[in-house]
Every structure is written in structure tokens, then in C-alpha cells.
Image: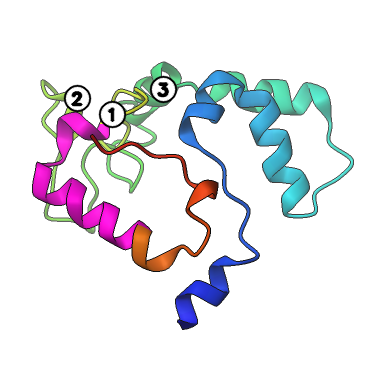
């Protein structure tokens, strides 16, 4: 019950909405955390620099190579396989791509968590099937 009450004031943003309108959703996130006024040119630049293709390029640069953002996190025992983009932290950026990664058992566990933690299920529109 404690977790449920903490979620009552949470603002929910879907990945699908972010993919459809990255600038609009990012603006909403900034507004939700009290950042205003918003510099529209800076917002546009940030969105452009944070595409999956751009982040994948950056992750492989020398600057990020051995950082938490790079493929080989020095604090982790997991290292990415350069040939397998699903092993990267910045994977493919596909909506509903989780279905290709998680097992049916994992998906049912996630559904149970959503059912247990959220009182208003309408704020999360996820089809795990």
C-alpha cells in the first residue's frame, strides 16, 4: 500500500509517445519537474543529439568507451558484444522491443507488478501480449 500512495502523484510518460513526439514529450517532462522557461533551440538540439543512432555512435567513441555509458562499463561484469546490439545499453530504440527480449514468464511478472503497484491502470497503457 505504501508504494501505491507514492505513485498517485507520479506523471507517466510512455515510450511510444516519446518516440512519436520527442520534443513535445521532453518539454512536458521539463515542465513536470519545474524547469521553465524552456529554451526552444536548446530543446531542439538536445533532442537531435539524443537519437538512438547518435547515442550508439557516442557509446563507441574513445570518450565513452570505458564509462557507464559505453559498451564496457568498468563497474559491471557485463560487457557488450559489438556484434550484438541487443547487448548494448543503447539498443535499438524500437517501441515494444521488450517483447523480443523478455520471456513470457518475464512479461507476466511485469504485468503482475503493474497490477499490484498501480491503482489506476488507465495511466499505463501497455499490452504485454
Assess whether residue 110 is covered by the magenta stretch.
yes
Quarter placement of the C terminus:
top left
Judge from the rendering whether residue 90 lies leftward or rightward of residue 84; answer left or right: right
Quadrant of the image occupied by residue 37: top right
Residue at 33 percent across and 36 percent down: it is 127
Report the span colored magenta.
Answer: 98-114
Which of pointers 1 and 3 lies earlier in the amino acid sequence? 3
* Residue lying furthest bottom: 2
From what the image shows, is residue 59 above or below residue 102? above
Q: Residue 15, how many percent across, how many down?
A: 47, 34
From what the image shows, is residue 19 above or below residue 73? above
Whole-angstrom CA distance, mark 1 to mark 3, is 8 Å
Judge from the rendering whether residue 84 lies leftward or rightward of residue 32; answer left or right: left
In-front residue for pair 59/84? 84
Q: Secondary structure at mark 1?
A: loop
Assess whether residue 1 is covered by the magenta stretch.
no
Residue at 41 percent across and 67 percent down: it is 117
Quadrant of the image occupied by residue 63: top left
Residue at 14 percent across and 43 percent down: it is 79
Instruction: Give the residue pinned by disc 1.
Output: 91
Instruction: Give the residue pinned by disc 3.
Output: 52
Judge from the rendering whether residue 30 lies leftward or rightward of residue 87; answer left or right: right
Instruction: Give the residue pinned by disc 2.
Output: 85
- Graded by Cα atoms within 10 Å as few (under 14), some (14 to 19) or many (20 or more), the crowding at tag 1 reads some
Residues marked 1 and 3 touching at CB (< 8 Å): yes
Quarter placement of the N terminus:
bottom left
- Graded by Cα atoms within 10 Å as few (under 14), some (14 to 19) or many (20 or more), the crowding at tag 2 reads some
Residues marked 1 and 2 touching at CB (< 8 Å): yes
Q: Secondary structure at mark 2?
A: helix
Q: Residue 19, how many percent across, how many down?
A: 51, 23
Amino acid at each position: 500500500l505504501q508504494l501505491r500512495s507514492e505513485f498517485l502523484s507520479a506523471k507517466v510518460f510512455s515510450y511510444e509517445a516519446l518516440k512519436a513526439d520527442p520534443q513535445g514529450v521532453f518539454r512536458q517532462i521539463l515542465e513536470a519537474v519545474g524547469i521553465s522557461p524552456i529554451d526552444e533551440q536548446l530543446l531542439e538540439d538536445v533532442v537531435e543529439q539524443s537519437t538512438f543512432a547518435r547515442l550508439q555512435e557516442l557509446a563507441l567513441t574513445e570518450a565513452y568507451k570505458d564509462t557507464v555509458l559505453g559498451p564496457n562499463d568498468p563497474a559491471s561484469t557485463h560487457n557488450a558484444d559489438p556484434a550484438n546490439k541487443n547487448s548494448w545499453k543503447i539498443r535499438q530504440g524500437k517501441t515494444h522491443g521488450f517483447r523480443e527480449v523478455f520471456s513470457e514468464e518475464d512479461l507476466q511478472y511485469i504485468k503482475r507488478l503493474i497490477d499490484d503497484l498501480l491503482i489506476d491502470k488507465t495511466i499505463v497503457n501497455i499490452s504485454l501480449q
